[in-house]
Image (spheres, grey):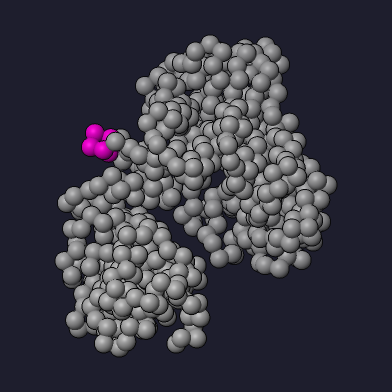
Amino acid sequence: MATVLVTAPPPELSTVTHQHHHHRVFNILTQSTTVSIPHLKQIHAQILRTGPAIHHSPETVFLYSRLMHFSSLRDLIYTLQLFNQIPFPNTFIYNTVIRAHAHSKDHKKQAFLLFQELLKQESLLPDKHTFPFVLKACAYLFALSEGKQTHAHVLKHGFGSDVYVNNSLIHFYASCGHSESARKMFDKMPERSLVSWNVIIDALVQMGEFDEALRMFVEMKPSFEPDGYTVQSVIDACAGLGALSLGMWAHAYILRKCEIDANFDLLVKNSLIEMYCKCGSLRIAQQVFQGMSRRDVNSWNAMILGLAVHGEAERVFKHFDQMINEEKIPPNSITFVGVLSACNHRGLVEEGRRYFDIMVNEYKIEPVLQHYGCLIDLMARNGQINEALDIVSRMPMKPDDVIWRSLLDASCRQSEFLDLSEKMARQIMAGEGRASSGDYVLLSRVYASANRWKEVGLVRKLMTDKGVSKEPGCSSVEINGIVHEFFAGDTTHPQTKEIYQFLGVIEERLKLAGFVQDFSQAPLVDEADDGKGQSLKLHSERLAIAFGLLNSKPGAPIHVFKNLRICKDCHNFTKFISKVFSVEIVMRDRLRFHCFRNGSCSCMDFW
């Protein structure tokens, strides 16, 4: 055992009595906030030299527990050596070694096994500190069964009302995707702390339940003052909803009231960049980015991804060059998703190929489905469908439905690929995932473009038989901090009458300016243009824009968020509105942002 710890003790330790030595070691381990591993090994060697009688004493066991406390998060192997030298470890020592495994990179499974070992000790019981460490490991591993077993022991040992333990249970269930169980845990808590609220709000954000997360935040405010963690979750929820006003309030709140350290400041500012980009305010996102005293790869990724989704390819390339050449930060896999997305949104095939090669050959980053998906979609939408299919055939992994949908969407725009479109549609519908309504709509479009109305009807019948309903178009617009939501053909809004009357005024003014409807993506049935045109007029983004024009201050930009991809006619319609009404309209659809100004769009009509 002495060969493990070869470092000689300091001279002064070798000349004092064992009792004096123990007292000094006790002071070092109880009064220090941190001790280096080499120093810990020196102390350990001296404890071993005190002899077997002292080695088994409660004092020595306590010293071992302190040694493990300092070593547990820095040297797992050494911590296990210490653990194995204690004949009768207590609950604190088990907790320490369980925590060490829960925080380790590759040995989290061992945390639950050690917990089971603890339960087998007749003289020991888990305490309120044991369960959070075990649940942390289960949450990271998505180990639902083991986590549920731990939950059962929580109840068995009487910790069902402990705030600390319940917070860990909420986080565990949320991490495993069981939002109902997480919410049930929170609702049943007899006592809640600020951490409890932070955990449930963050859980809802991670599961995409942004509206509910913000509702919980409002419910929390009378009882607790939000801290930096609360506000960061609010920022993330605002990013998901496109709620710019509330996001700006959260930003101001952090500046005014939250004291945060440098590391958390970096995290918050990265979230702010992402939020402003997703809310359509690139200018403020850039201000936050430029004002950062320190940036990491996530900062650059947030800015690059934000610029990419706005179609700002040239600025993406500039940021990429600054990142690697000026700040010497190596890009990662996510960086190249952003760069390739920028190429895709602008139709830059050669640049996309070049950056893909740079990623693989210069940075040795192995492409994943997202990288291949960007490149395949880019090539297919630029008419290079055969080349895109060649990449699919050479991919080391099986293409997912997203890639097949990209190819189907591109091929259905070109009549010569009708047979290929049918094959790809069948591929999607025969895939492991459930075919979405969009897949059927794409196939319908293929047949409609070839005037094969019988097949269009058969596709619609197939949707009915399989219980697949078309996802309704939904658009939202924020006015004075309130988000107003509209569905296609909506008549539920209090200002419905004024909205439709104003839409009529808009249409007349646009006709005078030369607007002509595009029926190519109207409902895919064989009917007169008048019927198709009437359907297009009911699209949700038109209602949202009309409402925005009615209620916004003159000159204020209108921000619209749509759940589906904008159709050609509505895109052209919005371009005309921006010119005729001298208004800037920022629209986020399912794929990207469109910024309409003076009759043109930032996408350059490529989307």
Q: Nearer the viewer, residue 411 or 282?
A: 282
Name the residue located 76 percent from the left edge and 65 percent from the top edge.
393
Residue drawn 48% across the image and 77% down it: 8
Q: Could you tell me residue 561's position as x and y percent?
A: 52, 33
The one of 527 and 66 positioned closer to us in this rendering: 66
Residue 376 x/y as whole percent: 73, 53
Q: Is residue 437 magenta?
A: no
Left or right relative to 372: residue 459: left
Identify the residue at horizontal 49%, vertical 70% (top origin).
38
For residue 1, above or below residue 316:
below
Among the 4 quarters of the image, the one containing residue 115: bottom left
- Would you say 22 lies left or right of 46 here? left
Q: Which residues are magenta?
A: 220-224
Instruction: Measuring from the top left, give residue 259's x and y in whole percent.
Output: 40, 36
Regarding residue 236, the answer to whether it shows in the image is: no
Magenta: predominant secondary structure element? Answer: loop
Q: Is residue 183 left or right of residue 102?
A: left
Identify the image quadrant of residue 96: bottom left
Query: Where's the C terminus, which quadrant?
Result: top right
Is residue 169 positioned above or below 318 on the image?
below
Give the total of numbered labels: 0
User: In this picture, is 214 found above or below 505?
Assistant: below
Residue 313 position by quadrant: top right
Was residue 221 drawn as part of the magenta stretch in this picture?
yes
At 39% across and 43% down in the image, what residue appears? 229
Nearest to the observer: residue 43 or residue 434: 43
